[in-house]
């Protein structure tokens, strides 16, 4: 298998790439990766934020005005095409190509069709959804996307609503499967001694701890959640927040916490390597996701659950597909952060319920949502596509 992607290979995309690749290799599949130069997800730092370790070229391109940035994305097809052709020549036994779809990227599908190689696209982004960085050449992006979605052998979407949105915009597309994200139980297992050590290290002993893991950016709304829960924390001294991550809003939130005199009750860890995340999750009794994309499958949701940390999350459709309210976590109406605050305060009063729901969440991940489950679904999908292709050829 060849895994091709055009991401920086860190943050959440790196977690996903390593999850799929490691699970495939564990099943005995030889997996090669072609990345942006300098963006191998195994060699770049496994950080939660992609802000500081990008190569000079990626830093330069990211500063381009939007039209020039998109033209650079389009031009990358030339570099990717050359590297892919070289790889194909050196690896005649390649079985199939798996690509993390990127806007304006079409050369992989084109070359695979010319060589008769099956290609499956994993779709995490689309010209059809609202984006933080609005598209300038949107019509071109949509035309390329429609072509690759139809010409690929198969498409993997992280949620049904995302797949349905693509169908609504593009009409007929290649066969699809829905595969939410996942987590490996082995990476998110800790002893009581490790839990006690983590809580002691961060000054959390004797408290109920609500955690957050992710970027401090407007669309994740952790800043707004902190602003809303501040007064409630003062009258609930048993509750502490453990916030992990950084981003554009980090300094602003930190200053707010200091101004409110809440530094002992809101612990801000900052950015940490991904392999340190389980140790921080060990200190949490529950977790908050203030917001998420209405079509995305947040990796952090699965990592919380794998650790036995019950999440409180917005009721977007992708989250409803994996979270059972009152059984493996809780939900609040998306966008209603005051309700999220109320949920956190209410749940903090019942430690027994937190423990039982957390164990149920961990059991769900163990049974249904580890990365090996995604691989089983993917390989079954590939076999079905191959069988259909053979049948069509026979006819």
Image: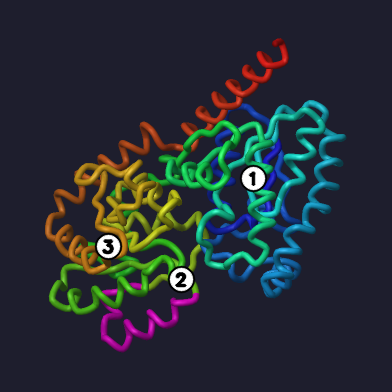
Q: 128 or 56: which is nearer to us?
A: 128
**Labels in figure, total:** 3
Crowdedness near tag 3: few (<14), some (14–19) or many (≥20) residues, C-alpha within 10 Å: many
**First-in-chain label (1 vs 3):** 1
Q: 222 or 211: which is nearer to us?
A: 222
Question: Could you tell me which quadrant the C terminus lies in?
Answer: top right
Tag 1 and tag 2, C-beta contact below 8 Å:
no
Magenta residues, as a range?
A: 248-267
- Mark-to-mark CA distance, 2 and 3: 19 Å
User: Label 1's element?
Assistant: helix
Name the front one of labels 2 and 3: 2
Crowdedness near tag 1: few (<14), some (14–19) or many (≥20) residues, C-alpha within 10 Å: some
- Mark-to-mark CA distance, 1 and 3: 42 Å
Rendered position, 95 above or below 395: below
Residue drawn at x 67%, y 50% is 143
Q: What residue is disc 1 on?
A: 146
Q: 181 or 33: which is nearer to us?
A: 181
Q: Position of residue 66 (x, y in %)?
A: 67, 71
Question: Could you tell me which quadrant the N terminus lies in?
Answer: top right
Q: Tell me the number on the disc at residue 217.
A: 2
Rendered position, 341 above or below 347: below
Tag 2 and tag 3, C-beta contact below 8 Å:
no
Q: Tell me the number on the disc at residue 210.
A: 3
Tell me where residue 9 sits by quadrant: bottom right
Q: Position of residue 120 (x, y in %)?
A: 63, 35
Residue drawn at x 54%, y 59% is 11
Classify residue 79 as left or right of residue 391. Answer: right
User: Label 2's element?
Assistant: loop
């Amino acid at each position: 298998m060849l895994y091709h992607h055009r991401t920086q290979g860190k943050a959440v995309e790196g977690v996903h790439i390593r999850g799929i690749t490691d699970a495939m290799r564990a099943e005995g599949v030889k997996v090669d990766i072609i990345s942006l130069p300098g963006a191998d997800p195994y060699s770049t730092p496994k950080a939660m934020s992609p802000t500081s370790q990008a190569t000079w070229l990626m830093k330069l391109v990211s500063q381009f005005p939007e039209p020039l940035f998109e033209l650079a994305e389009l031009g990358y097809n030339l570099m990717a095409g050359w590297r892919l052709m070289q790889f194909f020549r050196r690896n005649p036994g390649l079985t199939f190509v798996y690509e993390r779809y990127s806007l304006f990227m079409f050369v992989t599908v084109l070359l695979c069709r010319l060589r008769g190689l099956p290609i499956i696209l994993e779709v995490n982004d689309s010209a059809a959804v609202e984006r933080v960085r609005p598209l300038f050449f949107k019509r071109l992006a949509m035309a390329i996307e429609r072509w690759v979605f139809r010409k690929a052998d198969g498409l993997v979407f992280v949620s049904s609503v995302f797949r349905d949105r693509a169908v609504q915009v593009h009409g007929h597309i290649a066969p699809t499967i829905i595969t939410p994200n996942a987590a490996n139980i082995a990476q998110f297992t800790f002893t009581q001694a490790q839990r006690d050590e983590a809580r002691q290290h961060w000054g959390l002993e004797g408290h109920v701890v609500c955690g957050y893991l992710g970027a401090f950016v407007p669309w994740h709304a952790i800043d707004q959640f902190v602003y809303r829960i501040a007064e409630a924390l003062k009258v609930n001294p048993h509750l502490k927040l453990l916030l992990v991550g950084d981003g554009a809003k980090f300094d602003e939130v930190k200053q707010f916490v200091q101004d409110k005199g809440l530094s002992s009750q809101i612990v801000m860890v900052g950015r940490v390597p991904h392999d340190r995340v389980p140790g921080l999750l060990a200190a949490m009794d529950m977790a908050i996701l203030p917001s998420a994309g209405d079509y995305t499958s947040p990796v952090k949701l699965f990592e919380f659950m794998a650790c036995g940390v019950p999440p409180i999350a917005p009721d977007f459709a992708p989250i409803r597909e994996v979270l059972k309210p009152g059984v493996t976590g809780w939900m609040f109406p998306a966008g209603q952060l005051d309700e999220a605050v109320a949920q956190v305060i209410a749940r903090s009063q019942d430690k027994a319920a937190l423990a039982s729901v957390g164990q149920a969440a961990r059991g769900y991940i163990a049974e249904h949502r580890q990365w090996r489950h995604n691989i089983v679904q993917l390989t079954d999908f590939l076999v079905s596509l191959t069988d259909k292709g053979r049948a069509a050829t026979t006819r």
